[in-house]
Image (cartoon, rainbow, N blue to C red):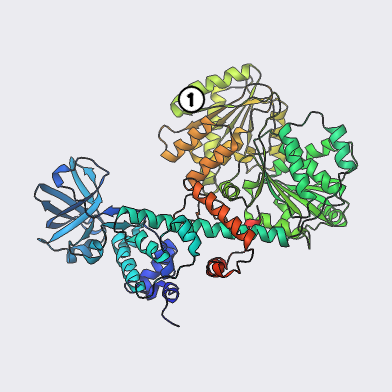
């Protein structure tokens, strides 16, 4: 193989000078770095200005990062075995600073030389009335790598990496050597000249050098701009390619009739006037279903805005055209509620509606599956059980997922397999788009409908943050509302890893409430995921009938419980919930005509992120605003993969802060595909090759909303 930049960058990381198999294994496990290209794309998160030095007598604040030049002396070992630490003093002409290491003591003792001049960089710590620098990065003033750039890169690291010499200093060295090697065979440019000139973008090779080792701030900014552009632009090309592919090659079932089912239900069975937003969304869905193009639409609307009615009318369009429809929900409680509600709504029409969940077993299940496969069942409501292979439809035309954030991408993809050769139209409904979906929405790969209007008479929910010290106030507020005839939810977290601990927490809360809300004056229901289904249903029904005033529950009531008389939601340990979950839980109240409240309880001391989440809930009831805040806190997820949050596929691009650039990239990608849909023009051939090389493993998950 010729020694090209591509062959160098495709080289496994263990063959790079200074790495070897042990360090390579660590880089793979800790950072997902397998090749030299992966190493180059593990970008620094900031740079140290190597031209600036602090004088020791000027240091008067902890937590600041400082760089000091001085003579090292008094190198000493303290303690024994695991408590060993090494200290040294760095002296300049203004004073002395203690340096301290708790790890790598043996290596440091052998390699540090007293009396030598060093440059120390690190974070100032204040301990026992004195400043020191724990685990400083040390280098010699004549270090070629340190002095090759005024701005030295700082990389994210872990304790394991640091212990093997792969901290910022170690990675700086191997990346510097790799870039020196690439000087002989610079990276080939893949963007057309007209894009580089129009946007005044830095050359690709120059950008990769300067994003690590810039000579000045201007070069660094230009390099970051180029890297971000490449990330956003090629992603937009991929999205445009997938959407064009879906529109051109994935046929959609044609629902060209609006027949008796839809018209009869719309004119005679709906006991209220639809909102303007509901009517607008139904028109958008009807246009999709009649176009011959596969529908992939997100329906967003806050709890109580009427998404289910829109979903029902869409299913009736499928029935009018001779197809079956299904709706799947994440819990049996919600699926059962949809089933009961739809059966009631459709009672005047001769429509076969069935319910399928894990609890439907034996002969009953067998008969249901036979009737479904024959087409006798027209609408199926169910849980994840609907996705399983034994569930076969005769001709599924529309699949709806409710509370879409609770289904994994791979799970939802199974719906595509339920009708062949043409997949069913897909409608996903949610009160809070998850970050992955919001990110896709920002890129325009998913068609979006929004019900931005609440039915008349609905009042916004007032949300408050209270800490443990405010417990008596909260109890007093509960008693006031109960006296007025209202009901209260109290929700505890239930996280699988600590289910036993959380259940104890819930039971302790129950016992505490029994003391403050004694029988017979107050009645309390309790519901959690480890109860038998019939016991849960019994307690739910007691609460629905207003036989109990307080319901203590885990997040099993996150979706699906509709009690208009409940006007207070108290969420315990709020700091342990995500924004999407908090918004869903709050939506359990505010369903009647009375003023409703949500109280977010937390410990007195909580993290910054927890505080931001709580303040977001206090400040807004808007689902899209909440999802955007969630996106900032958690990341957009792997948009073209199966992870839904936390794994950001962009290395440097921030889809909130860089939204304008993303918009420019999207518009440019759309124009290119309109002009050259297969990227076969000479000017685009290098771009196409780069797209194919870097996205050849993508399976098109992003088609699945």
x, y (%) of residue 321?
86, 50
Quick one: 543 or 160, which is closer to the camera? 160
Quick one: 369 or 277, which is closer to the camera? 277
* Residue 147 picture quarter: bottom left
Question: What residue sits right under mark 1 in the picture?
Answer: 471
**Apparent side of residue 229 relative to residue 129 in the rendered image (left or right):** right
x, y (%) of residue 695?
56, 65
* Residue 703 picture quarter: bottom right
Circle 1: element type: helix
Kindly tell me whether residue 580 is visible in this rendering: yes
| Residue at x-position 46% and y-position 38% | 610
| Residue at x-position 12% and y-position 49% | 96
| Residue at x-position 19% and y-position 51% | 53
x, y (%) of residue 113?
13, 63
**Is 181 above or below relative to 104?**
below
**Is 457 above or below relative to 201?**
above
């Amino acid at each position: 193989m010729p020694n090209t930049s591509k062959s160098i960058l495709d080289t496994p990381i263990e063959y790079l000078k200074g790495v070897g198999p042990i360090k390579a294994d660590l880089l793979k496990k800790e950072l997902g770095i397998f090749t030299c290209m992966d190493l180059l794309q593990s970008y620094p998160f900031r740079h140290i200005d190597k031209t600036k030095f602090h004088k020791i007598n000027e240091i008067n604040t902890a937590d600041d990062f400082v760089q000091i030049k001085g003579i090292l002396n008094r190198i000493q070992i303290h303690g024994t075995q695991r408590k060993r630490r090494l200290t040294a003093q760095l002296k300049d002409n203004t004073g002395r600073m203690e340096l301290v290491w708790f790890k790598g003591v043996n290596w440091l003792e052998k390699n540090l030389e007293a009396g030598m001049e060093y440059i120390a960089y690190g974070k100032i710590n204040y301990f026992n009335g004195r400043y020191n620098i724990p685990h400083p990065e040390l280098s010699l003033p004549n270090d070629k790598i340190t002095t090759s750039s005024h701005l030295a890169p700082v990389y994210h690291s872990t304790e394991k990496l640091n212990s093997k010499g792969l901290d910022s200093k170690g990675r700086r060295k191997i990346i510097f050597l790799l870039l020196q090697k690439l000087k002989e065979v610079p990276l080939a440019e893949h963007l057309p000249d007209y894009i580089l000139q129009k946007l005044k973008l830095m050359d690709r090779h120059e950008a990769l050098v300067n994003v690590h080792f810039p000579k000045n701030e201007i070069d660094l900014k230009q390099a970051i701009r180029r890297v971000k552009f490449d990330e956003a632009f090629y992603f937009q090309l991929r999205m445009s390619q997938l959407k064009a592919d879906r529109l051109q090659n994935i046929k959609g079932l044609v629902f060209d009739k609006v027949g008796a089912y839809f018209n009869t239900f719309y004119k005679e069975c709906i006991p209220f006037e639809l909102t303007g937003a509901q009517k607008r969304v139904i028109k958008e869905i009807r246009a999709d279903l009649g176009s011959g193009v596969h529908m992939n639409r997100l329906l967003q609307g806050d709890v109580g805005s009427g998404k289910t009615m829109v979903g029902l009318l869409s299913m009736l369009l499928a029935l009018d055209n001779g197809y079956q429809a299904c709706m799947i929900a994440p819990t049996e409680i919600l699926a059962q509620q949809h089933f009961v509600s739809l059966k009631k709504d459709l009672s005047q029409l001769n429509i076969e509606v069935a319910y399928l969940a894990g609890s439907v077993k034996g002969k009953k299940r067998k008969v249901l599956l036979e009737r479904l496969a024959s087409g006798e069942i027209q609408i199926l409501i169910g849980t994840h059980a609907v996705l399983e292979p034994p569930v076969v439809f005769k001709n599924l035309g529309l699949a709806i997922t409710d509370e879409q954030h609770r289904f994994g991408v791979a799970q939802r993809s199974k719906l595509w397999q339920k009708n062949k050769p043409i997949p069913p139209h897909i409608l996903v409904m949610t009160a809070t788009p998850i970050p992955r979906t919001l990110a896709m929405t920002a890129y325009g790969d998913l068609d979006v409908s929004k019900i931005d209007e609440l039915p008349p008479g609905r009042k916004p929910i007032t949300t408050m943050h209270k800490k443990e010290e405010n417990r008596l106030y909260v109890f007093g507020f509960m008693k006031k509302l109960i006296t007025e005839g209202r009901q209260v939810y109290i929700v505890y977290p239930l996280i699988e890893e600590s289910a036993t601990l959380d259940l104890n927490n819930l039971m302790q809360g129950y016992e505490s409430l029994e003391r403050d809300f004694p029988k017979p004056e107050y009645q309390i229901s309790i519901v959690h995921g480890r109860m038998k289904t019939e016991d849960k249903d019994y307690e739910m029904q007691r609460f629905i009938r207003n036989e109990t005033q307080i319901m203590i529950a885990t997040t099993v009531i996150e979706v699906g419980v509709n009690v208009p008389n409940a006007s207070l939601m108290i969420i315990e340990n709020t700091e342990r919930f995500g924004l999407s979950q908090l918004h869903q839980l709050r939506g359990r109240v505010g369903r009647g005509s009375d003023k409703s409240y949500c109280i977010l309880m937390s410990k007195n001391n909580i993290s910054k992120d927890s505080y931001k989440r709580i303040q977001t809930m206090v400040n807004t009831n808007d689902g899209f605003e909440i999802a955007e805040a969630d996106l900032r806190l958690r990341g957009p997820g792997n948009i073209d993969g199966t992870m839904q949050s936390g794994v950001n596929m962009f290395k440097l691009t921030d889809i909130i802060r860089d939204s304008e650039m993303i918009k420019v990239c999207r518009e440019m990608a759309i124009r290119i595909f309109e002009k050259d849909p297969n990227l076969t023009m000479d000017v685009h051939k290098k771009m196409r090759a780069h797209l194919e090389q870097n996205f050849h493993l993508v399976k098109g998950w992003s088609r699945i909303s």
